[in-house]
Amino acid sequence: MKTLPRPAPSAEERFAAVHTACHDTVYRYLARRIIPAHLAEDLTGEVFVIVWSKVLDGAHLEVPYVMAIARNLLRNAYRASAKASKLRAALALTQQRPAIQDPGVALGLAALKETERELLLLTYWDSFTSEEIAFILGTSPGAIRVRLHRARKSFAAALESESTQRGPLGKAARL
């Protein structure tokens, strides 16, 4: 008796087989490593969106390959979370403007570039160390120390320029 060749499984059937084989494993893997739980659900969904696109491209996926996709998405989620935290911290710092009592200091700070002003404010108003500022700004502590040195020089020059424009009693000189 001659048997007919069985047709190749459709993309939907292949996806269903992969989904059945590893959905719970992927979810548990992500849920153990990420909090809150709804993020594990979201990432699991993203994993299977990628799996679906791979299946449509004709790939025959095994469980370890799907787990590698989950691992990569988890790593990307960690990176995105760290970047978002840095951005939130930096934004919060830029929203807080200190009350500056001395008008000369206020004018000197206003004359600086935004990056120099922010560095001086983080150092002297917020009392962050070079290491902490480096973490906030995403650079090295050595680079922060060099930038801080330059910012101090610019600030001193701005203060000197401001004092020469003002008379000996602190009033603006008339030209």
Image (cartoon, rainbow, N blue to C red):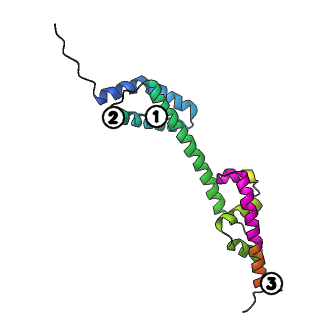
- Of labels 3 and 2, the one closer to you: 2
In the rendered image, the residue lying farthest to the right is 168
Residue shown at 68%/63% (left/top)?
118
* Label 1 residue SS: helix
Residue type of the residue flagged with mark 2: Asp
Percent position (x, y) of residue 17? 36, 24
**Label number found at residue 148:** none
Magenta stretch in the rendered image: 132-156
Which of the two discs, 3 and 1, labels the residue nearer the N terminus? 1
Residue shown at 76%/89% (left/top)?
173
Residue shown at 44%/27% (left/top)?
23
Image quarter of residue 51: top left
Whether residue 12 is situated above or below residue 154 in the rendered picture = above
* Label 2 residue SS: loop
For this rendering, which residue is in front, 157 or 35?
Answer: 157
Which residue is the site of mark 2?
57
Q: Quadrant of the C terminus?
A: bottom right
Which residue is the site of mark 1?
44
Whether residue 167 is situated above or below residue 160 in the rendered picture = below
Which residue is the site of mark 3?
170
146 within the magenta span: yes
Task: Please name the predominant secondary structure of the magenta segment in the image.
Answer: helix
Residue type of the residue flagged with mark 1: Thr
